[in-house]
Amino acid sequence: MSTTTGTGRLAVLGGPPAFPDGLPLVRPTIEDVPGLAARLTAVLATGLLTNGPRVRELEERLADRLDVGHVVAVGSCTAGLMLAYQALGVRGPVVLPSFTFAASAHAVHWAGGTPTFAEARESDLTLDPVDAAGVLGRLAAEGRPAAALSATHVYGTPAQTEALAELAAEHGIPLVYDAAHALGSARAGRAVGGFGTVEVFSLSPTKVMSAGEGGIVATEDAELARAVRIGRDYGNPGSYDCEFPGINARMSELHATMALFSLEHLDARVARRNELVEVFRAELDGVPGVRIVDPGRGDVSTRKDLTLVVDAQPYGLNAAQLARVLRAEGVDSRHYYAPPIHRQQAYAGLPSDGVPSDGLPSDGGQQRALPVTDRLASQVISPPLWSHMDDEVARRVARLVVEAGGQATAVREVLVEVPG
Ligand SMILES: Cc1ncc(COP(=O)(O)O)c(C=O)c1O
Protein backbone atom coordinates (compact mmCIF):
# COMPACT_ATOMS: atom_id res chain seq x y z
CA MET A 1 0.00 0.00 0.00
CA SER A 2 1.38 3.40 -0.80
CA THR A 3 0.65 6.45 1.29
CA THR A 4 1.16 10.16 0.84
CA THR A 5 4.17 10.03 3.16
CA GLY A 6 6.09 8.10 0.56
CA THR A 7 7.16 5.67 3.28
CA GLY A 8 4.52 3.08 2.58
CA ARG A 9 2.41 1.78 5.43
CA LEU A 10 2.29 3.73 8.69
CA ALA A 11 4.87 2.29 11.09
CA VAL A 12 2.20 1.63 13.70
CA LEU A 13 0.55 -0.64 11.11
CA GLY A 14 3.78 -2.48 10.43
CA GLY A 15 5.53 -0.23 7.90
CA PRO A 16 9.05 1.13 8.26
CA PRO A 17 9.36 4.31 10.35
CA ALA A 18 9.42 7.54 8.37
CA PHE A 19 12.29 8.84 10.51
CA PRO A 20 14.36 5.81 11.52
CA ASP A 21 17.01 8.04 13.15
CA GLY A 22 14.34 9.86 15.13
CA LEU A 23 13.03 13.38 14.89
CA PRO A 24 13.40 15.30 18.18
CA LEU A 25 10.90 17.88 19.29
CA VAL A 26 13.43 20.69 19.24
CA ARG A 27 16.85 21.32 17.79
CA PRO A 28 18.49 24.54 18.96
CA THR A 29 19.46 26.69 16.00
CA ILE A 30 23.01 28.08 15.98
CA GLU A 31 23.53 29.67 12.58
CA ASP A 32 27.30 30.11 12.88
CA VAL A 33 28.95 27.81 15.42
CA PRO A 34 32.56 28.95 14.73
CA GLY A 35 31.47 32.59 14.89
CA LEU A 36 29.70 32.10 18.20
CA ALA A 37 32.62 30.05 19.54
CA ALA A 38 35.00 32.91 18.67
CA ARG A 39 32.83 35.36 20.59
CA LEU A 40 32.71 33.04 23.60
CA THR A 41 36.48 32.62 23.44
CA ALA A 42 36.89 36.38 23.45
CA VAL A 43 34.78 36.61 26.60
CA LEU A 44 36.85 33.89 28.28
CA ALA A 45 40.00 35.82 27.41
CA THR A 46 38.72 38.87 29.32
CA GLY A 47 38.53 36.88 32.54
CA LEU A 48 35.25 38.64 33.33
CA LEU A 49 32.60 35.94 33.46
CA THR A 50 29.72 37.67 35.20
CA ASN A 51 28.50 41.22 35.94
CA GLY A 52 30.13 42.44 32.75
CA PRO A 53 29.59 44.38 29.52
CA ARG A 54 27.85 41.62 27.53
CA VAL A 55 24.97 41.48 30.00
CA ARG A 56 24.68 45.26 29.92
CA GLU A 57 24.74 45.27 26.12
CA LEU A 58 22.02 42.63 25.99
CA GLU A 59 19.85 44.63 28.38
CA GLU A 60 20.33 47.81 26.34
CA ARG A 61 19.59 46.16 23.02
CA LEU A 62 16.45 44.51 24.32
CA ALA A 63 15.20 47.70 25.99
CA ASP A 64 15.60 49.32 22.61
CA ARG A 65 13.94 46.53 20.65
CA LEU A 66 11.05 46.08 23.07
CA ASP A 67 10.70 49.83 23.61
CA VAL A 68 10.60 49.50 27.40
CA GLY A 69 12.32 51.58 30.04
CA HIS A 70 14.01 48.79 31.96
CA VAL A 71 15.35 45.37 31.05
CA VAL A 72 17.11 43.12 33.56
CA ALA A 73 18.81 39.89 32.45
CA VAL A 74 18.44 37.01 34.88
CA GLY A 75 19.36 33.35 35.13
CA SER A 76 16.00 31.98 34.03
CA CYS A 77 12.41 33.01 33.40
CA THR A 78 11.38 31.21 36.59
CA ALA A 79 13.85 33.26 38.64
CA GLY A 80 12.72 36.43 36.87
CA LEU A 81 9.09 35.73 37.70
CA MET A 82 9.96 34.89 41.32
CA LEU A 83 11.86 38.13 41.71
CA ALA A 84 9.13 40.16 40.01
CA TYR A 85 6.42 38.71 42.26
CA GLN A 86 8.65 39.23 45.30
CA ALA A 87 9.18 42.85 44.31
CA LEU A 88 5.43 43.30 43.85
CA GLY A 89 4.88 41.83 47.31
CA VAL A 90 2.12 39.46 46.25
CA ARG A 91 0.29 37.93 49.20
CA GLY A 92 -2.92 36.00 48.73
CA PRO A 93 -4.42 34.92 45.44
CA VAL A 94 -2.75 35.52 42.11
CA VAL A 95 -5.13 34.73 39.26
CA LEU A 96 -3.47 32.95 36.35
CA PRO A 97 -4.21 30.29 33.76
CA SER A 98 -3.87 26.61 34.55
CA PHE A 99 -3.12 26.02 30.86
CA THR A 100 0.54 27.07 31.00
CA PHE A 101 3.88 25.71 32.13
CA ALA A 102 4.16 24.83 35.82
CA ALA A 103 6.77 27.53 36.47
CA SER A 104 4.09 30.21 35.94
CA ALA A 105 2.46 29.01 39.17
CA HIS A 106 5.64 27.93 40.97
CA ALA A 107 6.96 31.49 40.86
CA VAL A 108 3.76 32.77 42.48
CA HIS A 109 4.07 30.20 45.24
CA TRP A 110 7.78 30.88 45.87
CA ALA A 111 7.04 34.59 46.23
CA GLY A 112 4.34 33.96 48.82
CA GLY A 113 1.22 34.17 46.68
CA THR A 114 -1.44 31.54 46.04
CA PRO A 115 -1.95 30.38 42.46
CA THR A 116 -5.64 30.73 41.68
CA PHE A 117 -6.58 29.35 38.32
CA ALA A 118 -8.80 30.60 35.52
CA GLU A 119 -9.81 29.14 32.17
CA ALA A 120 -8.11 29.20 28.80
CA ARG A 121 -9.75 30.57 25.69
CA GLU A 122 -11.00 27.94 23.29
CA SER A 123 -9.75 29.84 20.27
CA ASP A 124 -6.11 30.49 21.08
CA LEU A 125 -5.55 28.80 24.46
CA THR A 126 -4.42 32.00 26.22
CA LEU A 127 -6.03 33.18 29.48
CA ASP A 128 -9.77 33.82 29.13
CA PRO A 129 -10.35 37.38 30.39
CA VAL A 130 -14.05 36.68 30.93
CA ASP A 131 -13.37 33.75 33.22
CA ALA A 132 -10.54 35.64 34.93
CA ALA A 133 -12.97 38.50 35.57
CA GLY A 134 -15.32 36.05 37.25
CA VAL A 135 -12.58 34.69 39.51
CA LEU A 136 -11.35 38.19 40.41
CA GLY A 137 -14.91 39.34 41.14
CA ARG A 138 -15.63 36.35 43.36
CA LEU A 139 -12.41 36.82 45.32
CA ALA A 140 -13.20 40.50 45.85
CA ALA A 141 -16.75 39.69 46.95
CA GLU A 142 -15.40 37.22 49.49
CA GLY A 143 -13.11 39.88 50.93
CA ARG A 144 -9.97 38.17 49.67
CA PRO A 145 -9.00 40.37 46.75
CA ALA A 146 -6.40 39.11 44.34
CA ALA A 147 -2.85 40.42 44.68
CA ALA A 148 -2.08 40.17 40.96
CA LEU A 149 -3.30 38.93 37.61
CA SER A 150 -1.01 36.95 35.31
CA ALA A 151 -1.30 35.61 31.77
CA THR A 152 1.00 33.60 29.52
CA HIS A 153 1.60 34.26 25.83
CA VAL A 154 1.23 30.53 25.22
CA TYR A 155 3.38 29.20 22.34
CA GLY A 156 4.18 32.85 21.53
CA THR A 157 0.52 33.75 20.89
CA PRO A 158 -0.01 37.20 22.41
CA ALA A 159 -2.60 37.17 25.19
CA GLN A 160 -5.67 39.44 25.24
CA THR A 161 -3.62 42.41 26.42
CA GLU A 162 -6.34 45.08 26.20
CA ALA A 163 -9.00 43.17 28.14
CA LEU A 164 -6.48 42.03 30.72
CA ALA A 165 -5.14 45.56 31.21
CA GLU A 166 -8.69 46.75 31.84
CA LEU A 167 -9.29 43.97 34.32
CA ALA A 168 -6.08 44.65 36.24
CA ALA A 169 -6.86 48.37 36.34
CA GLU A 170 -10.40 47.72 37.51
CA HIS A 171 -9.09 45.68 40.45
CA GLY A 172 -6.09 47.91 41.04
CA ILE A 173 -3.62 45.03 40.80
CA PRO A 174 -0.41 44.45 38.86
CA LEU A 175 -0.51 42.49 35.61
CA VAL A 176 2.37 40.05 35.16
CA TYR A 177 3.02 38.40 31.82
CA ASP A 178 4.78 35.09 31.61
CA ALA A 179 6.31 35.85 28.24
CA ALA A 180 8.60 32.80 28.29
CA HIS A 181 7.71 31.88 24.70
CA ALA A 182 7.21 35.30 23.27
CA LEU A 183 10.48 37.13 22.63
CA GLY A 184 9.82 38.10 19.01
CA SER A 185 6.00 38.16 19.28
CA ALA A 186 3.91 41.28 18.67
CA ARG A 187 0.38 42.34 19.51
CA ALA A 188 -1.23 44.74 17.02
CA GLY A 189 2.18 45.89 15.84
CA ARG A 190 3.64 46.40 19.30
CA ALA A 191 6.39 44.11 20.59
CA VAL A 192 5.44 41.78 23.41
CA GLY A 193 7.56 42.97 26.33
CA GLY A 194 5.91 46.30 26.93
CA PHE A 195 2.52 45.08 28.12
CA GLY A 196 1.28 44.90 31.70
CA THR A 197 3.33 45.80 34.76
CA VAL A 198 6.13 43.45 33.86
CA GLU A 199 6.87 40.77 31.25
CA VAL A 200 9.34 37.94 31.78
CA PHE A 201 10.95 35.98 28.93
CA SER A 202 12.81 32.69 28.90
CA LEU A 203 16.05 32.10 27.00
CA SER A 204 16.21 28.36 27.71
CA PRO A 205 17.22 25.99 24.89
CA THR A 206 13.69 25.29 23.68
CA LYS A 207 13.01 28.98 23.06
CA VAL A 208 13.32 30.73 19.71
CA MET A 209 15.89 33.11 21.16
CA SER A 210 18.14 31.23 23.53
CA ALA A 211 21.11 31.90 25.76
CA GLY A 212 21.51 28.24 26.66
CA GLU A 213 19.70 29.21 29.86
CA GLY A 214 18.49 32.65 30.87
CA GLY A 215 15.63 35.02 31.42
CA ILE A 216 14.72 38.64 30.71
CA VAL A 217 12.59 40.94 32.84
CA ALA A 218 11.07 43.92 31.02
CA THR A 219 9.17 46.71 32.75
CA GLU A 220 8.46 50.43 32.75
CA ASP A 221 8.52 50.42 36.55
CA ALA A 222 11.94 51.70 37.69
CA GLU A 223 11.46 50.55 41.29
CA LEU A 224 10.45 47.07 40.21
CA ALA A 225 13.44 46.89 37.87
CA ARG A 226 15.78 47.95 40.66
CA ALA A 227 14.35 45.33 43.02
CA VAL A 228 14.84 42.60 40.38
CA ARG A 229 18.36 43.86 39.62
CA ILE A 230 19.32 43.73 43.28
CA GLY A 231 17.29 40.59 43.86
CA ARG A 232 19.22 38.68 41.21
CA ASP A 233 22.32 39.39 43.29
CA TYR A 234 21.10 38.11 46.69
CA GLY A 235 19.37 41.41 47.47
CA ASN A 236 22.78 43.09 47.59
CA PRO A 237 22.69 46.69 46.35
CA GLY A 238 26.49 46.64 46.08
CA SER A 239 27.33 47.38 49.69
CA TYR A 240 26.78 43.81 50.92
CA ASP A 241 24.15 45.25 53.23
CA CYS A 242 21.35 43.22 51.62
CA GLU A 243 18.04 45.04 51.40
CA PHE A 244 15.97 41.83 51.30
CA PRO A 245 16.61 38.11 50.90
CA GLY A 246 17.34 37.71 47.20
CA ILE A 247 18.73 34.84 45.19
CA ASN A 248 21.56 34.27 42.75
CA ALA A 249 19.83 34.77 39.42
CA ARG A 250 22.60 36.48 37.50
CA MET A 251 23.16 35.84 33.83
CA SER A 252 26.79 35.03 33.00
CA GLU A 253 28.76 36.85 30.32
CA LEU A 254 28.90 33.64 28.30
CA HIS A 255 25.14 33.27 28.32
CA ALA A 256 24.69 36.92 27.44
CA THR A 257 27.07 36.44 24.49
CA MET A 258 24.95 33.59 23.22
CA ALA A 259 21.80 35.64 23.74
CA LEU A 260 23.25 38.56 21.74
CA PHE A 261 24.13 36.17 18.92
CA SER A 262 20.64 34.72 19.06
CA LEU A 263 19.06 38.17 19.03
CA GLU A 264 20.76 38.98 15.72
CA HIS A 265 18.96 36.01 14.18
CA LEU A 266 15.65 36.32 16.01
CA ASP A 267 13.56 37.92 13.27
CA ALA A 268 14.76 35.44 10.66
CA ARG A 269 13.98 32.55 12.99
CA VAL A 270 10.47 33.79 13.73
CA ALA A 271 9.82 34.32 10.02
CA ARG A 272 11.10 30.85 9.19
CA ARG A 273 8.98 29.18 11.86
CA ASN A 274 5.90 30.93 10.56
CA GLU A 275 6.76 29.70 7.05
CA LEU A 276 7.02 26.16 8.37
CA VAL A 277 3.62 26.49 10.01
CA GLU A 278 2.24 27.36 6.57
CA VAL A 279 3.86 24.24 5.11
CA PHE A 280 2.02 22.27 7.77
CA ARG A 281 -1.20 24.12 7.15
CA ALA A 282 -1.11 23.40 3.43
CA GLU A 283 -0.93 19.67 4.13
CA LEU A 284 -3.56 19.69 6.89
CA ASP A 285 -5.99 21.72 4.88
CA GLY A 286 -9.30 19.90 4.79
CA VAL A 287 -8.41 17.34 7.47
CA PRO A 288 -11.43 17.29 9.78
CA GLY A 289 -10.86 17.76 13.48
CA VAL A 290 -7.31 19.08 13.40
CA ARG A 291 -6.61 22.77 13.77
CA ILE A 292 -3.44 24.76 14.21
CA VAL A 293 -3.42 27.16 17.17
CA ASP A 294 -2.96 30.58 15.60
CA PRO A 295 -2.41 34.09 16.95
CA GLY A 296 -5.08 36.74 16.47
CA ARG A 297 -5.30 38.58 13.18
CA GLY A 298 -2.55 41.18 12.98
CA ASP A 299 -0.56 39.58 15.81
CA VAL A 300 2.80 37.86 15.41
CA SER A 301 3.67 34.64 17.21
CA THR A 302 7.20 33.36 17.63
CA ARG A 303 5.69 29.91 17.02
CA LYS A 304 7.76 28.59 19.89
CA ASP A 305 5.61 25.52 19.34
CA LEU A 306 3.46 24.41 16.48
CA THR A 307 0.46 23.21 18.39
CA LEU A 308 -2.48 21.27 17.01
CA VAL A 309 -5.85 20.83 18.69
CA VAL A 310 -7.21 17.41 17.78
CA ASP A 311 -10.90 16.65 17.96
CA ALA A 312 -11.17 12.86 17.97
CA GLN A 313 -14.72 12.87 16.73
CA PRO A 314 -14.16 13.86 13.13
CA TYR A 315 -10.40 13.09 13.03
CA GLY A 316 -10.70 9.50 14.22
CA LEU A 317 -7.88 9.57 16.77
CA ASN A 318 -7.30 11.55 19.92
CA ALA A 319 -4.11 13.48 20.62
CA ALA A 320 -2.61 10.66 22.69
CA GLN A 321 -3.26 8.16 19.90
CA LEU A 322 -1.75 10.52 17.35
CA ALA A 323 1.33 10.83 19.55
CA ARG A 324 1.70 7.05 19.49
CA VAL A 325 1.42 6.99 15.71
CA LEU A 326 4.13 9.64 15.46
CA ARG A 327 6.35 7.90 18.01
CA ALA A 328 6.24 4.73 15.92
CA GLU A 329 7.47 6.84 12.99
CA GLY A 330 10.37 8.14 15.12
CA VAL A 331 8.69 11.53 15.59
CA ASP A 332 8.75 13.11 19.04
CA SER A 333 5.85 15.24 20.25
CA ARG A 334 4.52 16.82 23.45
CA HIS A 335 1.12 17.53 24.94
CA TYR A 336 1.73 21.12 25.96
CA TYR A 337 0.11 21.64 28.50
CA ALA A 338 -1.06 18.37 29.93
CA PRO A 339 -1.59 17.90 32.73
CA PRO A 340 -2.67 21.48 33.28
CA ILE A 341 -1.30 22.95 36.50
CA HIS A 342 -4.43 22.50 38.60
CA ARG A 343 -4.18 18.76 37.91
CA GLN A 344 -0.54 18.46 38.94
CA GLN A 345 0.56 16.86 42.22
CA ALA A 346 2.24 20.08 43.34
CA TYR A 347 -1.14 21.81 43.47
CA ALA A 348 -3.33 18.91 44.49
CA GLY A 349 -5.64 20.02 47.24
CA LEU A 350 -5.04 23.69 46.60
CA PRO A 351 -8.48 25.24 46.56
CA SER A 352 -8.38 27.52 43.57
CA ASP A 353 -10.43 30.10 45.40
CA GLY A 354 -9.55 29.09 48.95
CA VAL A 355 -6.50 30.91 50.12
CA PRO A 356 -4.38 29.27 52.77
CA SER A 357 -2.45 32.14 54.32
CA ASP A 358 0.96 30.54 53.81
CA GLY A 359 0.24 29.92 50.15
CA LEU A 360 0.68 26.18 50.58
CA PRO A 361 -1.80 23.64 49.29
CA SER A 362 -4.26 22.83 52.03
CA ASP A 363 -5.58 19.36 52.69
CA GLY A 364 -8.83 18.38 51.14
CA GLY A 365 -9.48 21.60 49.24
CA GLN A 366 -11.58 21.41 46.14
CA GLN A 367 -10.25 22.76 42.87
CA ARG A 368 -12.75 24.74 40.91
CA ALA A 369 -13.51 22.76 37.78
CA LEU A 370 -11.82 24.06 34.63
CA PRO A 371 -13.61 22.07 31.92
CA VAL A 372 -12.29 24.02 28.94
CA THR A 373 -8.74 23.75 30.19
CA ASP A 374 -9.13 20.03 30.88
CA ARG A 375 -10.53 19.35 27.43
CA LEU A 376 -7.93 21.43 25.63
CA ALA A 377 -5.19 19.66 27.60
CA SER A 378 -6.50 16.34 26.30
CA GLN A 379 -6.61 17.64 22.73
CA VAL A 380 -3.27 19.38 22.21
CA ILE A 381 -0.21 17.98 20.56
CA SER A 382 2.94 19.76 19.43
CA PRO A 383 5.00 18.00 16.76
CA PRO A 384 8.66 18.93 16.16
CA LEU A 385 9.55 22.42 15.03
CA TRP A 386 12.87 24.23 14.89
CA SER A 387 14.06 27.31 13.12
CA HIS A 388 16.35 25.54 10.63
CA MET A 389 13.93 22.72 9.82
CA ASP A 390 13.59 21.95 6.09
CA ASP A 391 10.21 22.31 4.42
CA GLU A 392 10.40 18.67 3.47
CA VAL A 393 10.65 17.50 7.09
CA ALA A 394 7.65 19.62 8.08
CA ARG A 395 5.72 18.32 5.08
CA ARG A 396 6.47 14.69 5.90
CA VAL A 397 5.41 15.08 9.52
CA ALA A 398 2.21 16.84 8.47
CA ARG A 399 1.49 14.06 5.99
CA LEU A 400 1.86 11.52 8.77
CA VAL A 401 -0.82 13.42 10.67
CA VAL A 402 -3.05 13.34 7.59
CA GLU A 403 -2.36 9.66 6.99
CA ALA A 404 -3.03 8.72 10.61
CA GLY A 405 -6.47 10.29 10.40
CA GLY A 406 -7.13 8.61 7.07
CA GLN A 407 -6.35 5.21 8.56
CA ALA A 408 -7.82 5.91 11.97
CA THR A 409 -9.92 2.76 12.17
CA ALA A 410 -6.99 0.43 11.55
CA VAL A 411 -4.75 2.48 13.81
CA ARG A 412 -7.24 2.37 16.68
CA GLU A 413 -7.48 -1.40 16.40
CA VAL A 414 -3.72 -1.82 16.59
CA LEU A 415 -3.40 0.60 19.50
CA VAL A 416 -6.04 -1.28 21.47
CA GLU A 417 -4.14 -4.54 20.91
CA VAL A 418 -0.87 -2.98 22.07
CA PRO A 419 -1.60 -0.68 25.00
CA GLY A 420 1.08 1.93 25.42
C1 LIG B 1 5.31 29.36 30.00
C2 LIG B 1 6.63 29.14 30.66
N1 LIG B 1 6.95 29.84 31.76
C3 LIG B 1 8.12 29.71 32.39
C4 LIG B 1 9.06 28.82 31.94
C5 LIG B 1 10.33 28.67 32.68
O1 LIG B 1 11.40 29.19 31.95
P1 LIG B 1 12.89 28.93 32.44
O2 LIG B 1 13.23 27.52 32.07
O3 LIG B 1 13.71 29.93 31.69
O4 LIG B 1 12.90 29.15 33.90
C6 LIG B 1 8.81 28.05 30.80
C7 LIG B 1 9.81 27.11 30.31
O5 LIG B 1 9.69 26.49 29.29
C8 LIG B 1 7.56 28.20 30.16
O6 LIG B 1 7.25 27.45 29.09
Image (spheres, grey):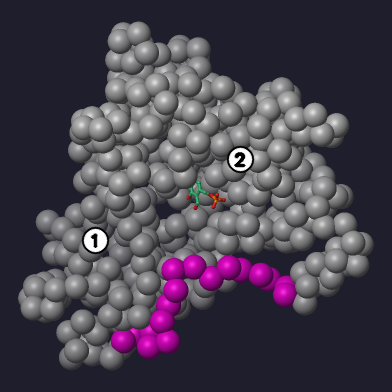
Magenta: main secondary structure: loop
Q: Is residue 208 above or below residue 416?
A: above
Q: Residue at x 43, y 77 (%)?
A: 23
Circle number at residue 85: none
Q: Residue at x 29, y 50 (%)?
A: 339
**Residue that badge 2 annotates:** 80
Res. 394 image quadrant? bottom left
Residue range highlighted in magenta: 17-33
Q: Tell me the kind of residue under disc 2.
A: Gly
Say which of 167 and 103 sits in front: 103
Q: Tell me the kind of residue under disc 1.
A: Ala
Residue 201 visible? The answer is no
- For mark 1, give the secondary structure: helix
- Relative to 399, 79 lies left or right: right
The N terminus appears in which quarter of the rendering?
A: bottom left
Q: Is mark 1 within 8 Å of ligand 1?
A: no
Res. 10 image quadrant? bottom left
Circle number at residue 319: 1
Q: Residue at x 13, y 64 (%)?
A: 316
